[in-house]
Image (cartoon, rainbow, N blue to C red):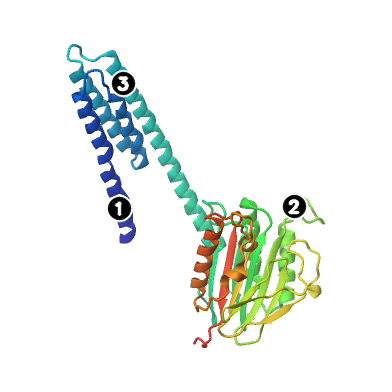
Amino acid sequence: MAQRSEGLRRPERTSRALVAIPVAWIVAVSVIDILAPPDIHLGPLLVAAPAITPSFGGPRTVGLVAALAVIAQTVIGLLRDSDTLLSSNHQAQIIALILVGICLVIFCVVRDRRAKELMQVRYVSETAQRVVLPALPGQLGPLRAASLYLAAEAEARIGGDLFAAARTTSGTRLMIGDVRGKGLTAVNDAALLLGAFRGAAHRQASLGELVYYLDRSVCWDLMEPGETSRYGETFITATILDIPDHGGRVQMISCGHPPPIVLRAGRPTTMDASRPAPPLGLGELSRSRYRVDSFPFEPGDFLLLYTDGVTEARDSTGTFYPLAERITGWTGNDPDALLDRLRRDLLRYVGGRLNDDAAMIAIERPAEPRV
């Protein structure tokens, strides 16, 4: 709390220090104008002082600087026009400064109000993310885990990408997915699938039965109002995995989602499904027709799951992000460090902004058993 308060006070001190710039400008223009020959008028330059103040100050600061500019223009007029009170030229300049000052104050009020609204939106979106899509715990039984979500919209914190984990008596079940579509509808659909997974993943059911249950849940939840037999156009690509705690092979069912990558001694291997299932929500398969693939996941290995927002990100030439190439040679032992490196590299690759939401999960099976 003390650090946050200090962080808030530091910009205030900086803003107060910057006020010296327009004040010094007003003083300099006033002195030069008074000392200049009668045919030279620098008073119009005073408008620059209140004009630059909104870049670092609020309505009160802008109003104060504008008032100082008006006072300075009045003093210049009184000293330059000794035979009259104020010439029509100086009166026009004073009126112009007053109008400019009023407009700038109104602008600052509107800007600050919108800034407060934006802060509230950010707070709501961050709260929604913590509720709907919390970060994975750092420890999942003997496994170490890390998760990352990158929203394409600058002010958004959550979209249609999703991930979740659930512990069973013998291992960990993971899901990563991507809802077709964007906006609040995609967030709602993601929340529905996450709720179904969290409610069923811990049960003693096979991976095929779990995926069938998720597909049925998505079909019914995403059905258009009033429909009884036809499913809507929304679907969700997903990969669901069952990772045993002590050795054994990882079981996987891919529902139209990008394949996971296993990183072993710096060498990535893409685990393609032999027969991917359709995306969830299309309702085309029975529980007996889901093909379960498996692959080894040994101590010291990393398992990387991701959405297509990662692999379909493009650079300035339109080239897709080469995920497997980017992680080749990485031999660290920290999932958070791996995702942090990928985040920085991905944003640098696309020039700082993604065109689609992106989510990643990194799982490590430690080389030494953890007690």
- Badge 1 crowding class, 10 Å Cα cut-off, few under 14, some 14 to 19, many 20 or more, is few
Q: Amino acid at mark 1?
A: Arg
Q: Is residue 118 above or below residue 110?
A: below
Q: Nearer the viewer, residue 333 or 247?
A: 333
- Counting from the top left corner in percent of width and height, residue 123 is at 47, 53
Residue 252 position within the rendered picture, expressed as x and y whole percent measured from the top left:
69, 76
Q: Is residue 354 left or right of residue 1?
A: right
Q: Which residue matches tag 1?
A: 10
| Disc 3, SS | helix
What is the distance, in whole Å, between disc 2 and disc 3 at their CAs? 64 Å
Q: Nearer the viewer, residue 216 or 369?
A: 369
Residue 224 is labelled as 2
Kindly report which numbered mark, 3 or 1, lies closer to the viewer in this rendering.
3
The secondary structure type at the circle numbered 1 is helix
Amino acid identity at mark 3: Gln
Determine contact: label 2, label 3, CB under 8 Å: no
Q: Look at the picture and state if 125 lies above or below 30.
A: below
Q: Is residue 1 visible?
A: no
Figure label count: 3
Give residue 93's mark: 3
Give the left or right position of residue 294, taking residue 267 as reference: right
Verify CB contact (< 8 Å) between mark 3 and mark 1.
no
Which circle, 2 or 3, is nearer the viewer? 3
Q: CA distance from mark 2 to mark 1?
A: 52 Å
